[in-house]
Amino acid sequence: MTNMIMGTLLAVGYLVMFWLFGALVPEKFQSGKFPVMCINGFLLYYTLFEIVAFPMKYLCCSLKQLTVIWGCLLILLVLFVIWKRRRVLADSVRTIPGSMQKNISVLILLLVAVGLAVLLGFNINTLSTYDSNNYIGLPVASVYSNTLDRVAPYSGVLLKAPEQFYIMNTDTLQSAIVYQVLNIHPLMERKWSFTIAMVILFEMGLYQCANGFFKKKEAEKTVFVILADLVLLFSYSLGGVSQYFAYRTYEGKAIIAYLYMTVIFGFCLAIYRKETSLWPWCGLFLCGTGGIAFSNSALFIVPCMIGATLFPYVLCDGILKRQWHLLKRYIIVLLPSVFWMLFSHLV
C-alpha cells in the first residue's frame, strides 16, 4: 500500500513538474491554456534531460553525478518558475473554468482521463516481455552499479560503454534517478506512476485536437475525446498504436507512437487553423529535440509526421503565396530531427 501511495504521488509530481516546465517557455511561445502548457512542459523537460544526460552517458559518468547535476538544475528551474513565472502559472489555471457546459465537459473528461489512466496502470498483461525486462532491468542495474546503462540487464555483465544502439536513449536514466533518490522501484515508477502521467497527458493532447476541430463546442469536444479512446481500446492491432497504448503504455516506442503523434497532429491543426501565436511551432520544435530520449523511432517518425502534415500548408500558404516566414519556421522545426539523424551516424 505504501508503494502504491508513493507511486500515485509520483504520478501527480510528474504532471506538476511538466506544468512548471511549461511555464519556462517564453511568453511569445505560450498559448495560455493549461493542457498545452503541460504538454509543452513535458516536451521541454525531456529535451533538457536529453541535453544533460546524453553527454554524461556517452562519457560513461556515474549515476550519482547525473543525479546531482540534474537535481540541482531542477531545483534552480523550479525556484525560477515560482519566483519569476507565477503569473504565467496563474493565468493557465484561470483558463480552466468557464461556462457551466464547459465545466461539466472538463469534469467528464477529467474523470475519463483518470479512470483510463488507473485502468491501464493496473493492467498486468504485456505482449513484450523482452522490452519490459529491459525498461525495468536497466534502471535497477544502473542504480546498483552506479553507472549509466552500462550493465547488461539479463547477464549482469558490466559493459565498457552503454550499448551503442541505445546510446542516445536516456529515458531509462530518469527511472534510475527516481529509484536512487526516492527509492521507488522502476516496476512501480514505470508501470504505475509514469503510465498514469502519460495517459493523462495523452488525454490533454486529444483535447487539444478536439479544440482545433470544434473550438467552443464543449459537448463535441467531450464526445471526440471519448470516441478516440474507444477506438484505441477496441481496435487492437499487433504492433500498432492501439497495442502500444493499451499494453506498453510506458515504453519509449509507445510514447512516440501514441503521445508524440497526437500532440504533433494537434500542433499542426492549430497552425492550419491560422493560430497567430508561435506556441504550435514551439511544440513541434520540442518534439524534434526531445523525442530521441525515448526511442530511436523518433529519428524517422517525428520528422516524417511533421514534414508530411505541414507540407501542404507550407506549399500553399508559404511558397505559393510567398510568405517565406512559414517556410523558415518549417525548416527550423525539422532541423533538430535532421541533427539527431546525422549525429546517430557519428556516435
Image: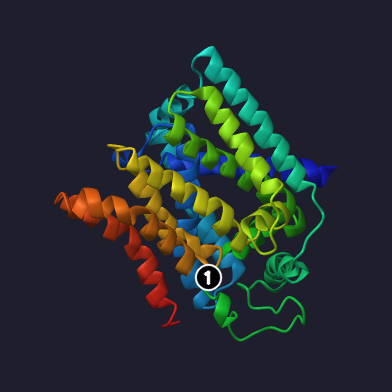
Residue 314 in the image, given as x and y percentages of width and height:
26, 53
Q: Looking at this rendering, what residue extends furthest in the top direction?
A: 100
Work out whether 129 lies above or below 224: below
Q: Residues within 10 Å of mark 1 (few under 14, many from 20)?
A: many
Residue drawn at the location 27% of the way across and 60% of the way down: 331
Q: Secondary structure at mark 1?
A: loop
Give the left or right position of residue 123, taking residue 340 as reference. Answer: right
Can see residue 325?
yes
Give the left or right position of residue 80, taking residue 119 as reference. Answer: left
The kind of residue tagged 1 is Asn
Residue 187 in the image, given as x and y percentages of width and height:
76, 58
Give the left or right position of residue 147, taking residue 302 as reference. Answer: right
Q: Looking at this rendering, what residue extends furthest in the left direction?
A: 322
Give the left or right position of residue 324, taking residue 240 as reference. Answer: left
**Residue at the disc numbered 1:** 296
Residue drawn at the location 57% of the way across and 61% of the way down: 67
Q: Quadrant of residue 131?
A: bottom right
Q: How many numbered discs, if any?
A: 1
